[in-house]
Image: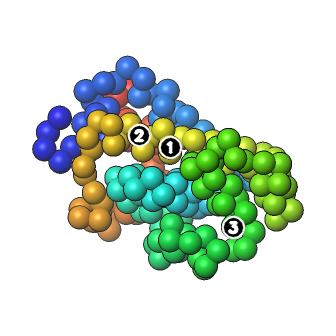
Amino acid sequence: MPENPHLADVYKAFPECVKPLLAYHDALLRGESPLTVAERELIAAFVSGLNACSFCFGAHKIYARAFGVDDTVIDALVANVDDAPVDEKLKPMLKYVAKLKNLPPMLSAADATAVYDAGWSERALFDAIQVAALFNYMNRIIEGTGVTFDYANNPLSDEEFEARKTRRYSDFGKMIGIE
């Protein structure tokens, strides 16, 4: 890997499974869901922040911002879900995915009930679980392969930021030569 590698460097070095992985990202994060794209990107950034994965935390804060989520909300969630300035309906869902990240065997029916009582469906919870699981996985890929690129130290141009509003994850693969 080069010095200060980006995920693109990893994908180009080991392309065998990248195309289906990016298709899964597209289906999960941009497909039909009771959760908005902004909520799914917020969950991706939140889980990545809890995992201290600076690459995914920074990248998905950008995506969440592109879909209308203020960076300070995500930072506040990572610090303390209860005190964060986020819709109260989201808090049980975010507590669920935080517990899934930290203590999966400790999840109980009461945790799911709190999500349902807040007005979410089983499908919404399943989508949140999938996003959390995907980013626990991706955070480990990033950290395990030594990706050190940090969006906080490499801000996007206005043009690059605007592209995040319409770019699919499979488009990233095409940009780096994985068709």
Residue found at x 45% / y 53%: 51
Left or right for 124, reference 5 = right
Whether the residues at callouts 1 and 2 have beta carbons within 8 Å, the answer is: yes
For the question of whether residue 119 can be seen, the reply is no
Looking at the rendering, in which quadrant would you find the C terminus?
Answer: top left
* SS at circle 3: helix
Quick one: label 3, few (<14), some, or many (20+) residues within 10 Å? Answer: many
Q: Residue 47's x, y, as percent? A: 52, 54
Q: Is residue 26 left or right of residue 31?
A: left
- Looking at marks 2 and 3 on the same chain, the residue that comes earlier in the sequence is marked by 3
Q: How far from the left and from the top, in percent, is residue 167?
A: 45, 49
Residue ID for mark 2: 140
Residue type, label 3: Lys
Kind of residue indicated by mark 2: Arg
- Colour mode? rainbow
Q: Nearer the viewer, residue 23 or 57?
A: 57
x 37%, y 20%: residue: 16
Name the residue carrying label 3: 91
> Which is nearer the eye, 167 or 150?
150
Percent from the top left, x then y, of residue 65?
Answer: 48, 67
Kind of element beneath mark 1: helix
Q: CA distance from mark 1 to mark 2?
A: 6 Å
The residue at 41%/40% (across/down) is: 140
Q: Are marks 2 and 3 in contact (CB under 8 Å)?
A: no
Inter-mark Cα distance, 1 to 3:
19 Å
Q: Mark number for residue 136?
A: 1
- The answer to whether residue 47 is above or below residue 118 is above
